[in-house]
């Protein structure tokens, strides 16, 4: 490349860090080059060639604050602003450049540096959006599960999985607490080390578990986290090994109903300390509320079912009384008709067997005769026979020698006997009778007489307390007996043999029916059990909505396919992870039924597009996974993804609306390093998120760059955790001055990380990882402590600290901040908190309460970066804001190319602040011209490099 060429050169794989080497390659050999920049979005940075002297590096940095042009032909020095970025360049050449080449090279350098830094800014925005999307999806799944119709254990297991995706939750349990009865139940318990097996239906006495950390949490009533030994020590609870092993880190949050503790959720880690953060605590409190809602719904349903059962029983009882009255009236009518029938039947009856049956039928119309028999004395008078017997429990009554039974008692006394269970017991106790067969609850027998001689008897009996006989029934049965004995003499001899055969046939037929019925029931039970097992197996391995295989089946097939790849003759395969774009919008606008219809149609289109040989699974929500075998390279995989996108993009009518669905697809090709299907699914998922970040409706192939980026972020998070343990953070102070005379009125405390390898790092280097992992809150509290110690030693002016919106998720943030101020001996009236407009939109009532608590103690609020967010007048009027900080992007435009636009915006902001009686502070004041314009517009205060850079010691400001 010649020096006259002006084509922009892309940065190498090293990004901005390799920028100096790239530009130096276009200069004479052995030339030395330094590039320095400062940007609020990606922070400051420096890139230099390996042979650059310290003086040249210092000169480039100095030009960021004050530009001094080059004075020698063998030097190139330049500085400029580019959309909020301050850039400086210093080069020392081994030989001078021609004037034309020098101008061309400077143009080339400006374009190259600008393009490289713009790419870094875009990447920072992408990463921030990806983190927000993951968190939002997890919270949606939790809310959806809490309102689902799953069984309790299934729902809690699914919630355990979701929580495990957001924080370490291998050891997780849920406990319910009755503060009145002082009992608790472990509703759900999953632990890797504790062998305890929880029964959700068993209540445990709190007094028996007084030294348990769980009981301490329930009685304390507030979230607790940290090492279990430390928590027990703080709560003055003695350690008891019988309650399970100690945890390196323990997090528990109570569940509340109407202000009372009703249970708790706990996660713990046995291997790693400081594993849980305030963000984890907030998320766990959210989960606890939804679990409590599900339990309340279950309890309400059970109470409703009990009320329905009670009302049903009341109606049944009333119906029984009414039916009894009806039966009594009908019985009176039947009695009159039966008396005439019995009289007629005694004269015209046919066979003896038919006579017995007709008598039984008539008696059954008049009284309870389900258990009825006729007993006769044998001709020799030594035995008793039963020519007719119908009984619910005693199917066949055999002849027997005369004994002391109830029937023999009637035959011997010649008088009717009406006896209930108590009377029978008295007769047995006196030795008068002995019961044969099943015990009757009520027994009624009357004698059969011929010429005043007893020849037998008629008996009815009941086996249930609901049926009893009375005197009226006894009179009726006595009357019937008088009409039977006339026919007995004629038919007794010839019917004796016939009755014996009939009884035998009846017994055989009854037994056969019983066996056939039992056989049918057994076959039906076996068939039903087989069908139930098949249905349960299918439900456990398939999605209930689409009918597609679920994650379990997909992982099994992936593991099996990976295992078969040991054969060198086999062609590779690919996993496609597909997520429908803007699916939540469909659910919110058209309803969940429309969303379900869209999911079913999506599953059908995917299956139809790839054929039945391809495994298509629904993983949950709007996520699908596809296993395609026989894919050997990227071209084939991307072609398959294009086919899917085209098929899914066809119009779809749902709930009366024409939709044009789209999807984002991540692709992972098999490589020998894969050992488990879960690994491939994870990489395809990461590629899918990259596709969403690039604009959706496209596919992205997983590559080593994604793996490297994931590794870098993982290492940075580990470094950040170590830095928290080592307290490697400190505040740097930048003065805030009165523009009229340059007097310092306060300072802003800015966070810096003293990295063990890279030295001091500004927040932009690590803030993203800190926000994503939830560690940023711990970092802030470490810095706040140092700032308050500094305030206690320096008594002039106020100090402002930056407060992340995450802190407002904690109900006790204001109280904790004030308590830390008191512990340090600092004056709260000297403290200012800087918040962003986004923080005011999340939970306005709660944030307003916290700001009022702080304001009552003298801590005032500043609205940072005003003008870059929503800038809603309603929020300025509603919240106690003391000052607006005009974003430095507007101040930087004053006196530059964007002067007119920036001037109008700054004038409008100052007018708004003046109308509301709010102070204004201009940020990023770097030139005297900017200062003078702000003063002319009426801005009273300002801060920026013109008055001093952030330093670890107390800065001295000047005008």
Image (cartoon, rainbow, N blue to C red):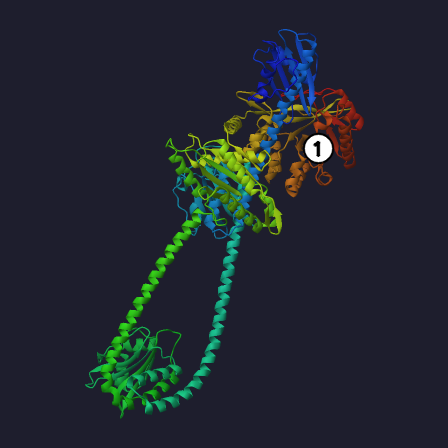
Residue 584 image-quadrant placement: top right
Q: Which one is nearer the viewer's eye here, 567 or 415?
A: 567
Q: x%, y% of residue 717?
A: 52, 29
Q: Where's the C terminus, which quadrant?
A: top right
- Residue sticking out furthest to the bottom: 451
Determine if residue 605 is in view: yes
Q: How many marks?
A: 1
Q: Is residue 422 above or below residue 257?
A: below
Q: Is residue 830 left or right of residue 294?
A: right
Residue at 55% from the left image edge and 46% from the top image edge: 143
Determine if residue 249 is in view: no
Q: x%, y% of residue 220?
A: 52, 43
Q: Which one is nearer the viewer's eye here, 348 or 442?
A: 348
Q: Is residue 264 left or right of residue 738?
A: left
Q: x%, y% of residue 705?
A: 52, 27
Q: Is residue 474 left or right of residue 883?
A: left
Q: Which one is nearer the viewer's eye here, 64 or 117?
A: 117
Q: Which one is nearer the viewer's eye here, 841 or 500?
A: 500
- Residue at the disc numbered 1: 866
Q: Is residue 425 above or below residue 251?
A: below
Q: Where's the N terminus, which quadrant?
A: top right
Label 1 packing within 10 angstroms: few (<14), some (14-19), many (20+): many
Q: Secondary structure at mark 1?
A: strand
Residue at 71% from the left image edge and 30% from the top image edge: 885
Q: x%, y% of residue 667?
A: 50, 35
């Amino acid at each position: 490349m010649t020096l006259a060429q002006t084509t922009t050169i892309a940065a190498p794989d090293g990004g901005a860090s390799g920028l100096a080497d790239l530009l130096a390659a276009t200069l004479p050999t052995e030339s030395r080059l330094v590039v320095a920049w400062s940007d609020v979005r990606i922070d400051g940075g420096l890139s230099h060639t390996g042979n650059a002297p310290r003086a040249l590096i210092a000169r480039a940095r100095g030009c960021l604050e004050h530009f001094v042009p080059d004075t020698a032909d063998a030097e190139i020095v330049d500085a400029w602003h580019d959309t909020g970025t301050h850039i400086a360049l210093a080069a020392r050449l081994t030989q001078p450049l021609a004037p034309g080449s020098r101008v061309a090279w400077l143009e080339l350098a400006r374009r190259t540096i600008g393009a490289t830094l713009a790419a870094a800014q875009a990447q920072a925005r992408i990463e921030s959006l990806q983190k927000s999307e993951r968190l939002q999806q997890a919270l949606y799944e939790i809310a959806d599960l809490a309102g689902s119709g799953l069984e309790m254990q299934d729902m809690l297991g699914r919630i355990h999985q979701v929580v495990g995706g957001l924080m370490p939750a291998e050891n997780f349990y849920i406990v319910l607490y009755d503060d009145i009865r002082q009992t608790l139940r472990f509703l759900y318990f999953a632990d890797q080390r504790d062998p305890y097996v929880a029964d959700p239906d068993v209540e445990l006495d709190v007094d028996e578990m007084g030294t348990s950390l769980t009981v301490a949490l329930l009685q304390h009533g507030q979230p607790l986290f940290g090492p279990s030994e430390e928590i027990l020590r703080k709560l003055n609870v003695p350690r008891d090994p019988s309650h399970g092993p100690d945890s390196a880190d323990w997090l528990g949050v109570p569940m509340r109903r109407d202000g009372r503790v009703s249970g708790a959720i706990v996660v713990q880690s046995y291997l790693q300390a400081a594993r849980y953060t305030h963000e984890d605590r907030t998320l766990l409190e959210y989960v606890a509320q939804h679990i409590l809602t599900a339990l309340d719904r279950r309890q309400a349903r059970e109470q409703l079912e009990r009320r329905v059962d009670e009302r049903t029983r009341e109606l049944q009882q009333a119906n029984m009384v009414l039916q009894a009255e009806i039966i009594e009236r009908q019985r009176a009518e039947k009695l009159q008709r039966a008396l005439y029938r019995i009289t007629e039947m005694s004269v015209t009856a046919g066979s003896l067997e038919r006579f017995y049956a007709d008598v039984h039928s008539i008696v059954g119309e008049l009284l309870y005769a389900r258990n009825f028999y006729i007993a006769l004395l044998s001709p020799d008078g030594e035995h008793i026979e039963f020519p007719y017997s119908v009984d619910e429990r005693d199917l066949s009554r055999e002849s027997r020698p005369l004994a002391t039974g109830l029937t023999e008692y009637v035959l011997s006394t010649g008088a009717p006997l009406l006896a209930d269970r108590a009377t029978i017991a008295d007769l047995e106790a006196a030795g008068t009778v002995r019961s044969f067969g099943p015990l009757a609850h009520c027994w009624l027998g009357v004698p059969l007489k011929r010429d005043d001689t007893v020849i037998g008897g008629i008996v009815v009996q009941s086996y249930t307390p609901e049926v009893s006989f009375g005197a009226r029934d006894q009179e009726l049965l006595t009357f019937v007996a008088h009409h039977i004995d006339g026919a007995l003499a004629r038919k007794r001899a010839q019917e004796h043999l016939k009755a014996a055969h009939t009884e035998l046939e009846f017994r055989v037929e009854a037994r056969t029916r019983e066996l056939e019925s039992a056989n049918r029931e057994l076959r039906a039970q076996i068939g039903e059990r087989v069908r139930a097992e098949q249905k349960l197996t299918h439900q456990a391995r398939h999605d209930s909505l689409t009918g597609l295989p679920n994650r379990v089946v997909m992982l099994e097939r992936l593991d099996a396919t990976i295992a078969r790849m040991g054969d060198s003759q086999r062609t590779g395969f690919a996993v496609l992870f597909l997520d429908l774009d803007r699916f939540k919008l469909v659910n919110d606008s058209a309803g969940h039924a429309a969303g379900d219809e869209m999911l079913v149609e999506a599953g059908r289109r995917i299956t139809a597009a790839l054929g039945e040989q391809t495994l298509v699974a629904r993983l949950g929500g709007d996520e699908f996974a596809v296993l395609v075998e026989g894919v050997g390279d990227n071209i084939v995989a991307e072609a398959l993804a294009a086919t899917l996108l085209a098929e899914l993009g066809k119009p779809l009518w749902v709930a009366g609306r024409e939709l044009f669905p789209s999807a984002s697809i991540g692709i992972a090709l098999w490589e020998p390093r894969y050992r488990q299907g879960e690994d491939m699914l994870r990489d395809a998922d990461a590629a899918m998120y990259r596709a969403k970040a690039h604009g959706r409706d496209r596919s992205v192939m997983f590559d080593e760059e994604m793996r490297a980026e994931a590794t870098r972020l993982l290492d940075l998070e580990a470094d950040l955790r170590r830095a928290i343990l080592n307290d490697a953070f400190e505040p740097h102070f930048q003065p805030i001055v009165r523009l009229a005379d340059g007097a310092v009125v306060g300072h802003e405390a800015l966070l810096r990380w003293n990295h063990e390898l890279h030295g001091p790092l500004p927040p932009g280097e690590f803030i993203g990882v800190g926000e994503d992992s939830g560690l940023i809150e711990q970092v802030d509290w470490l810095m706040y402590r140092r700032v308050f110690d500094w305030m206690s030693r320096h008594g002039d002016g106020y100090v402002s600290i930056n407060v992340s919106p995450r802190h407002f998720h904690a109900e006790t943030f204001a109280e904790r901040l004030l308590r830390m101020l008191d512990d340090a001996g600092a004056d709260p009236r000297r403290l200012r908190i800087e918040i962003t407009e986004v923080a005011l939109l999340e939970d306005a009532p709660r944030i307003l309460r916290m700001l009022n608590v702080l304001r009552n103690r003298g801590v005032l609020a500043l609205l940072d970066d005003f003008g870059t967010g929503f800038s809603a007048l309603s929020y300025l009027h509603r919240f106690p804001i003391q000052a607006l900080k005009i974003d430095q992007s507007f101040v930087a435009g004053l006196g530059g190319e964007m002067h007119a636009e920036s001037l109008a915006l700054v004038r409008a902001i100052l007018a708004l602040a003046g109308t509301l009686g709010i102070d204004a502070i201009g940020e990023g004041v770097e030139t005297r011209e900017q200062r003078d314009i702000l003063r002319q517009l009426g801005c009273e205060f300002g801060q920026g490099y013109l008055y001093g850079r952030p330093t670890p010691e107390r800065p001295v400001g000047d005008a």
